[in-house]
Amino acid sequence: MRGNLAAVGRALAFVLLALALCGVIFQLAGYSAIEMFQSIADGAFLNPNAWQGSLRWAMPLFITACGVVVSFRSGYFNVGAQGQFYIGAIGSTFVVDFLNGYPAPLVVPLAFVTAIVCGALWAAWPGYLRVASGADEVITTLMGNFIASLILIYVTGGILKDPSGTGQVMASRPVAEAYRISSEVGLSPAIVGIAVAVGVLTWVLVNRTAFGVLCGLAGRNPTMVVWQGARMSQLGLAAFALSGALAGLAGVIEVLGPNGRLVSGFLPTHGFTAILIALVAGLSVAGTAVVSLFFGGLAAASLYLPVLAGLPAAAIDIINAAIALFITARAAPGLAWLLPRRHAAGGA
Amino acid sequence: MIAESPPALRCRNVSVRYGDLAALTEVSVAFAPKLIHAVVGQNGAGKTTFARVVAGIVRPVSGTLEIDDREIALGHVNRSRAAGVELVHQSFALPPSFTVAETMEFGARRGRPIFTRRELEERWRRHLENLGVQARLGDRIRDLPVESQQGVEIARALVADARLLILDEPTAVLSPSGVETLFQRLRGLKASGVTLLLVLHKIREVLAVADTVTVLRGGRLIEGPVAANSVDARELSAAIIGAEAEKALTMRDEEALVGSDLPADARHLVAAKPKAPAILVADRLSTRPDPEGPALGEVSLAIAPGEIVGVAGVEGNGQRTLVRALTGLAQVESGRIRLGDQDLVGLSTGERRARGLRVIPFERNSEGLSLSSSLWENWSARQLLRGSPLRLISPARFRGECDRALKRWDVRYSTTLQPAGSLSGGNAQKLILAREVDDDASFVIAAQPTRGLDVGATAFVWKSLRDATARGCGVLLISSDLDELFDISDRLVVMLSGRIAAEFWPPFRLGDVGAAMTGAR
Amino acid sequence: MEEFLVATLRYGTPLVYVTMAGVLAQRAGVWNLGLEGLMIIGCCASVLGFVQTGSLLVGFGLAIAICVLASALLWFVVEKLRANPIIAGLGLTGLGLGGTDLAVQAIYGSQAMVNAPYGLPRLGPEFGAFGVLSILVALMPFVVFLVWVVLRRTRFGLQLAACGEHPFAARSVGVNPSTMRLIALCAGGVLCALGGMELALGSLTIFAYGMTAGRGFMAFSAVIFGAGHPLASAAAALFFSIVGAIGIRAQLLFGNRVPNDLLLALPYIATVIGVWVSARLRGGATTSGFGELRDY
């Protein structure tokens, strides 16, 4: 337990360091750092409606982050959550658009399955290139993100385009009311239920199945599990597909839930934020749930800042990026006491 | 007996700590110039640390260092090099993609810093010729045989005018004839006025080459430099091993540990074991060349239950490929492998393990264990791989079983949740033994199982392998330590370029085995 | 044909500069995924410095200064705090994107673009069709050659390569890998600034949010494709630019029949294929193999 506490302390210390860097950047850009942080806290947690907004953003982030936990634990840097999220959203929009008019009990589950499968497939090709040839998954998944957002622009401007829409924002036709799983608020029982179910299942998978424990071992030392007789290609492909599937699931939730339609370039930082959540949580599922709330709050604040405080939303991107910069740090001058101590080595 | 001239190297009260571990404690010693000095001791005695302190790579917490009577700053490679100290590392510190000429140049301290390829090779050709190193300047390090790599590393150390050359375990990777060539080269260097400091652990080699010998044990100086021709091999071996540890060892094991080469005919009065049908048979096994070693060429082996077969050979002659082919990690091109009455070719590593094959891999810290994972995760890896991957498991039950197993194997640890990296080398190896040498094991492949272990741990590994054979296991032991192989093998095969070059039965003779290792036979 | 070459050089020159930055970092043993961020900082700082003071030189200096500073920050985080270079690099990229956005908003309100009055000096009409290219395009081959000489034909380059390939070997001849990495990253910062400047002020005269559009990541894969060799990596970068130029050309030719957005994806697809091919050829050197989340 002491090791866990130390890890939490270390994560907090580096988040604070990141925030300090952000403060410097805000000041240099000519804003008051104090005012900025104050407004962000207002937008995220302090104003009366903030919690609703924070939770709304936290749910899909948490689901995607669970997927990131699975792939990162297995040692695969699938940084393509954004693309997998988009492709899942696109797949489900096709289903609800083409099957418009069919009964909801048929269409909605089909949309979910399609999103999950699409997300999984969009993660599976970089996964396959990685396990079959060793092609670096960081680059392939990043490129997958760029390609997916171009596909999103293409479908929202073409096949799925809403003819009545204005020229400014390209979007699909709105999803029929019958297929929606929540209102704009985005906190329906269905979404909360799905998030809880994903959380519980991921926790069990990671901590209480042979697959999960092996993935953990493989992530820290793939050579060792290969010598033990594991097939890394299957393990890795499963981890990729699973993380893509969860990102796709988050995609369909956004489309059938709060968004209500597919919008070109929507939530451009969703995948990156989910990766951050998983890393800040130290790749633990329970931690991911807590950290999701914090980043959900930041996401809510990024809507609040320009509208109600007159401050640029880019501030939130900077905070996220600064946390990413520091969060994997393992050593800190002067912070050595936070690091877990070595266990006394037995003599032999 | 130390000469009147000022010492080439004098250390006073040098202490080194790695975290909680004291690697060197208050070592004070002086070495006379223009001689060959041997520093001996068991693994973990602090020899390598001592060498690195002198070279400036490790900074001691206290102490002073004088080269030719001038004190030098501690922990600065450049200061040590400027004073004429150069170090040749045990596993050579040469970037594998560099050419021989580039290797010379990157450590050079003089000469034009910009060059053409031609100029570069011209610059270093003479240097290599003077030292008698057989390597073309355009060859890449990774393509060189291990003897040439060592030659290149020595040449690299001599690009500046070294006055004190330290060699860390230079004989560990060489064949017996390679060792002889090396010693010739060292005597040549001594004649040209260089002081040499050799870190060794075989008494036989000390007596063959050194002028003085210094013993370290547990990071402390046990015996100052004494003239090598005046020491008694048996006393020296006692000083190296320590009186307490000695009691627990058989004389045969003790000799193997220090390579003391005492009465050869006293070794291995073998009781010929009854011939049982082989448990593991490899029949004309061939593979493609592997990124990790040469191809196997028609390797045939038959190992009976209760038999320990040793594999000798200069490193990189196909031992890795053999182990990987038997384990199922390298593709077999032709030939058969049989374990008991089952054909293994075509089965995955996991399936082979399920049939009783066990492996202690070459690299303990990368292939054997995940250092940042907990003890119980490391211990249960093999069991996790059996059955459906999605079945539910109970970590608490695994922890309990792991606890019992580790207690039985006498592993020193505080909790099964601690990372494997927090164990000492010996305990880490015991953890691997606890996992691999279980009751279901029918054949154990032990690859370099004692590398880097101290006396007690080494003896423990030997004992557990012998115990396994007593239960009817077959054992294939791959080692680069001939003394170890001679001590515990029932039979010995020598690998050369991916083939089995020779087979020996006890009593083993160093000269014969060594000749087979280099293909001289 | 000339037009096509011009389009390739326009697309490719910023990419080659940034690729050289990636090569330096990779040689020294750092996988620099912050290239994308450094490049956008280069774009933004050069345009803002220029527009605010009216002097191209100030823009040039500002871009170099900030890029070097940001590179040093990455070095500090990766070397001194021992952060995972992949994640930290992505963080630096995010910082570049967010920071440039913030800077533009702070100065111009909610405007998404900044226009510069004119761009870098051009080669001039005596070069025919190539006259429209900026002087940084002409400088590019010399920079590639310089990087090659430094890395392959100087003792410094050998020492740098040793730091990446075998840091212990470097340490044992008295070379400090950490310092060498700082030098490599900062030199890379200068190159990223040049690349960003060429992108923003070479063919265009504009800064727009996210205008690098993954070019930094492409440069990174060009380094993988070229196995860290300066000439091979530059060739890989030019290959990606040819694909990009083909995409632009195809838009002009059959923009009405083939969707534009999918043609824009061509360089990304080429990059994936490039990484895959180099993995097939060389057995796959992956960046995350160096990850700190792993235990060796």
Image (tube, rainbow, N blue to C red):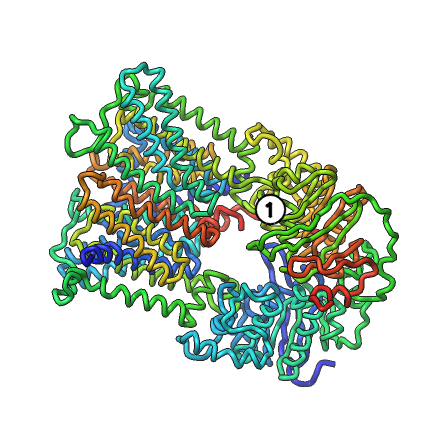
Above-or-below relation of C258 to C175: above
Q: Position of residue B343 (x, y in %)?
A: 68, 40
Residue at figure coordinates x 36%, y 23% from the top left = A191
Quadrant (top left/top right/bottom left/bottom right) for the C terminus of chain B = bottom right
Task: Give residue A193's quadrant in the image.
Answer: top left
> What is the chain identity of the residue bearing mark 1?
B
Residue under pointer 1: B329
Above-or-below relation of B468 to B26: above
* Residue closest to the far bottom: B4
Viewer can see residue B277: yes
Q: Position of residue A8 (x, y in %)?
A: 47, 40
Name the one closer to the observer, A250 or B47: A250
Task: Give residue B40's quadrant in the image.
Answer: bottom right
Residue at figure coordinates x 65%, y 77% from the top left = B185
Q: Position of residue A143 (x, y in %)?
A: 34, 44
Task: Give residue B205's quadrant in the image.
Answer: bottom right
Q: Position of residue B379 (x, y in %)?
A: 64, 40
Name the one closer to the observer, A96 or A278: A96
Viewer can see residue A59: no
Mark 1 burial class by Cα count in 10 Å: few <14, some 14-19, many 20+: some
Quadrant (top left/top right/bottom left/bottom right) for the N terminus of chain B = bottom right
Name the one closer to the observer, B443 or A328: B443
Number of numbered tags placed on the structure image: 1
Residue at figure coordinates x 14%, y 64% from the top left = C128
At label 1, which amino acid type do we have? Leu
A153 vs B396, left or right, is left
